[in-house]
Image: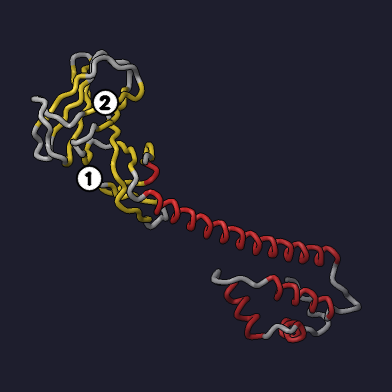
Amino acid sequence: MAIDTTGGVNLNDVIANSGVSTSTTNKSLTSSATGSNTLGKDAFLQLLVTQMQHQNPLDPQDNSEFVAQLAQFSSLEGITSLNESVSNITSAMASSQALQASSLVGRSVIVQNDKAVVDTTASFNGQFVVPQSISEAKITITDKDGNAVKTIELGSQAAGYADFIWDGTNSKGEKVDPGTYTFTATTTVNGQSVQMNTLLPAKVTSVSFNTTGEMVLNLAGVGKVSLSDVQTIGI
């Protein structure tokens, strides 16, 4: 802010007559310079009014300077309001994320992964990604020790997402124990075996937030997965 000193009025005089304590204003000005604080709009307006009251009547402040200072005050007030609005939006988003996080615990989500905790007493549904039309596809299921349990032949598939169902039995038709199983989807292209990505369901056991504020899901049998990596949220 420009202060006219031709009339013998210095900054301390202006501050003293404005009702703002010298120590408080100096602290605000110093803090503003270091970036840790800003001069409040109320103190700014008090200084502006006091400057007008103590200007040299023989050499009053130029109109353009006065308009520029009013523009500065308007900008300061706008920035203050914007900061308050952003702060309110941030708080609302944090509350919304916390509510969303609590509602996800215990629910099933679909993520790109090759392992899943399977309750073999019921049918298990999964998907795999078909990059192009293929003449055959198969799902190989292995247990936690790497032993092949069963292979599901699926035949030709069109490009996109393909579904498969495992009834929880081995190649002999016997029910296997519940546990963690690995699902590998493969096809043959130009005589070579090609592995395809699988999309499997997993249960959300807990939810946390990383250092950037992003929601992270802790999935049974899978581990930590970012919410952005979830394909579908089920029941």
Residue annotated with mark 1: 221
Which amino acid does the dot numbered 1 rest on? Gly
Depth check: 191 or 187 in front?
Answer: 187
Which amino acid does the dot numbered 2 rest on? Phe
Residue at image point 21% right, 17% down: 188
Residue 227 picture location, percent across and down: 38, 45
Disc 1 from disc 2: Cα separation: 20 Å
The answer to whether 71 appears left or right of 148 in the picture is right
Residue at image point 73% right, 71% down: 1
Q: Quadrant of residue 142?
A: top left
Q: Which mark is residue 212?
A: none
Depth check: 171 or 31 in front?
Answer: 171
Q: Earlier in the sequence, mark 1 or mark 2?
A: 2
Q: Residue furthest right?
A: 58
Dot 1: few (<14), some (14–19), or many (≥20) neighbours within 10 Å? some
The answer to whether 183 appears left or right of 85 in the picture is left
The answer to whether 130 appears left or right of 4 in the picture is left
Residue 144 picture location, percent across and down: 12, 40
Secondary structure found at label 2: strand
The answer to whether 144 appears left or right of 136 in the picture is left
Where 180 sits versus 138, above or below? below
Residue at image point 69% right, 60% down: 78
Dot 2: few (<14), some (14–19), or many (≥20) neighbours within 10 Å? some
Residue at image point 26% right, 37% down: 113
Residue annotated with mark 2: 164
Figure coloring = secondary structure
